[in-house]
């Protein structure tokens, strides 16, 4: 199978590219998981995050946003002492805060999926083969999430997030996954 040029030989990277990246997701649990992982990725490589993903899931109650929204100082200390994850206090506190806001968005829109997909009228945006780090859509969503109080949701993080959850399909033209789901 021909893949995007950025995919290396790491089995986790290959699996992520082949089975997740760019595939539309409407599942709030997955949408939250990816939001957490993308926010922890800030300043790091995605491969680093994928290598720690199982550890994140184990110590973050399988990314259950209801549980995460209730994390206290004891849990923050536990996470800061866990070498299996990214131990950044600002990112950990932002994750807890973002879980609370995620839940409030669900209450307002019935699901977070309704909220996030609504920005693009429930349609997929297709990349044009150029490597970019943000666009008008990610700018708008990042601004709205920030206004609502979320942190570590800048436009570059949100652009990567939109790629991850399939709102933006940026598979390269030579990749076998390019537009595959619409064929």
Image (cartoon, rainbow, N blue to C red):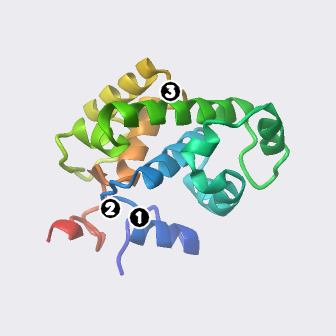
Residue positioned most to the bottom: 1
Q: Is residue 167 above or below residue 15?
A: above
Q: Is residue 43 above or below residue 180?
A: above
- N-terminal of the two: label 3 or label 1? 1
Drawn side of residue 40 relative to residue 158, left or right: right
Kindly report which numbered mark, 3 or 1, lies closer to the viewer in this rendering.
3
Q: How many labels sit on residues?
A: 3
Foreground residue among 104 and 14: 104
Q: Secondary structure at mark 1?
A: loop
Residue positioned most to the left: 183
Q: Position of residue 147 (x, y in %)?
A: 42, 18
Q: Secondary structure at mark 3?
A: loop
Q: Looking at the image, do the residues carrying marks 1 and 2 touch, with CB atoms under 8 Å apart?
A: yes
Q: Secondary structure at mark 2?
A: loop
Q: Which residue is mark 2?
A: 23
Q: Position of residue 76 (x, y in %)?
A: 77, 37
Q: Which residue is mark 1?
A: 20
Q: How far apart are the alpha carbons under marks 2 and 3?
A: 25 Å
Q: Position of residue 153 (x, y in %)?
A: 48, 31
Foreground residue among 99 and 143: 99
Q: Is residue 47 above or below residue 159?
A: below
Q: How far apart are the alpha carbons under marks 3 and 1?
A: 24 Å
| Disc 2 residue crowd, few under 14, some 14–19, many 20+, Cα 10 Å | many
Kindly report which numbered mark, 2 or 3, lies closer to the viewer in this rendering.
3
- N-terminal of the two: label 2 or label 3? 2
The circle drawn on residue 150 is: 3
| Disc 1 residue crowd, few under 14, some 14–19, many 20+, Cα 10 Å | some
Foreground residue among 1 and 28: 28
Task: Please indicate, yes or no, whether residue 101 appears anywhere in the rendered image.
Answer: yes
* Residue at the (39%, 37%) spot, across then down: 106
Residue 67 sits in quarter: top right
């Amino acid at each position: 199978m021909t893949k995007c040029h950025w995919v290396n030989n790491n089995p986790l990277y290959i699996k992520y590219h082949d089975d997740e990246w760019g595939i539309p997701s409407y599942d709030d649990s997955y949408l939250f998981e990816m939001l957490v992982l993308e926010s922890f990725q800030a300043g790091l490589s995605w491969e680093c995050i994928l290598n720690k993903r199982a550890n994140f899931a184990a110590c973050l109650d399988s990314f259950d946003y209801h549980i995460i929204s209730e994390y206290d100082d004891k849990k923050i200390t536990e996470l800061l002492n866990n070498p299996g994850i990214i131990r950044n206090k600002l990112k950990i506190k932002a994750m807890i805060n973002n879980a609370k806001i995620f839940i409030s968005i669900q209450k307002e829109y019935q699901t977070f999926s309704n909220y996030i997909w609504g920005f693009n009228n429930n349609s997929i945006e297709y990349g044009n083969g150029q490597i970019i780090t943000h666009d008008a859509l990610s700018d708008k969503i990042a601004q709205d999430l920030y206004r609502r109080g979320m942190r570590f949701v800048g436009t570059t993080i949100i652009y990567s997030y939109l790629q991850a959850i399939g709102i933006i399909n940026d598979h390269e033209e030579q990749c076998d996954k390019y537009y595959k789901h619409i064929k």
